[in-house]
Image: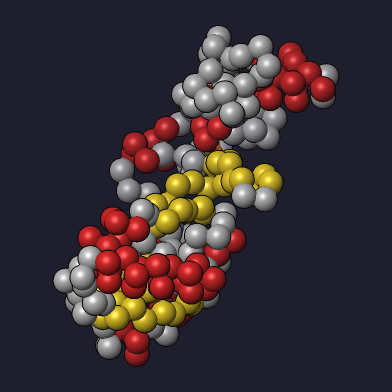
Amino acid sequence: MIIAEWKPIPELVSMLKGHKSVLLVGCATCVAECAAGGEREVETLAPLLRMALKTEGVSVEIKRKTIERQCEWEFVEALAGEIEEVDAVLSIACGIGVQALSERFAHLPVYPGVNTTSLAIREQPGLWTARCAACGDCVLGETFGLCPVARCAKSLMNGPCGGTRHNGMCEVDENVECVWNLIYERAKARGELQKLYEVRRAKNWSNSAHGGPKRMLREDLRP
Ligand code: SF4
Ligand code: SF4
């Protein structure tokens, strides 16, 4: 899922100052799963914002709405009525949702209420860890199902880097397991260590973020 976390309240307050009425919009999909941008978070954030704005001597009406997905036009369209009544929008969806609202309702400022952080999995209650960086050339078939792009601090394609701690943790963050150590251990457990000696093709980075804006075109799905 796409995960995100709230921006600090003072940052949100500085965005909303100067507006009279703001629609706080949640998204009931990924960001709801990671407890950052769903209906519950809309209901929690709205009074916090009101209070923080009031402390600054500013009165802003905060209206609330949560839609199923902010990244699909049919759901975005359902906001058209409420948008008429406000002079700004605060979206707590991921960056895709914020941009969709901003594109559809281009006459209004649409502010991001969260920082979108990664494509991640919930490992434990309250702990999400990145699993994919959408690099555009998946190597999981060669790395025993563990992603070195998203999970190695240096995105090494031929790790480990030599800094792995003795307990298997990453030298950059000792709270994170060295993914190349995990790759080694999984290869060993499968009796396939020799695969790590194979010379692999160079990874194609042209589809990653370094290659400019990405797009995917499926002629078979086009009208
Ligand atoms: S190799 Fe690329 S596409 Fe595959 S999981 Fe990692 S970042 Fe995602
Ligand atoms: S210790 Fe492992 S995960 Fe950390 S930077 Fe080195 S190879 Fe990457």
Q: Is residue 87 above or below residue 128?
A: below
Q: Quadrant of residue 206?
A: top left
Look at 78% across and 18% down and name the residue there.
188
Look at 23% across and 65% down and name the residue there: 56
Name the residue rendered at 46%, 24% in the picture: 154
- Please give the name of the residue rendered at 32% of the width and 65% of the height, measured from the top-left corner: 52
Side of 205 relative to 13 (left or right)? right
The percent coordinates of residue 161 (x first, y second) are 53, 13
Which image quadrant is residue 35 in? bottom right
Number of marks drawn: 0
Image quadrant in which the C terminus is located: bottom left
**Can residue 56 be seen at all in this image of the molecule?**
yes
Structure colour scheme: secondary structure
Left or right placement of residue 183 versus residue 211 in this view: right
Query: Residue 180 at what x, y percent from top left?
Result: 62, 21
Question: Image quadrant for the N terminus?
Answer: bottom right
In this picture, is 90 found above or below 135?
A: below
Asked whether 66 or 137 is in front, the reply is 66
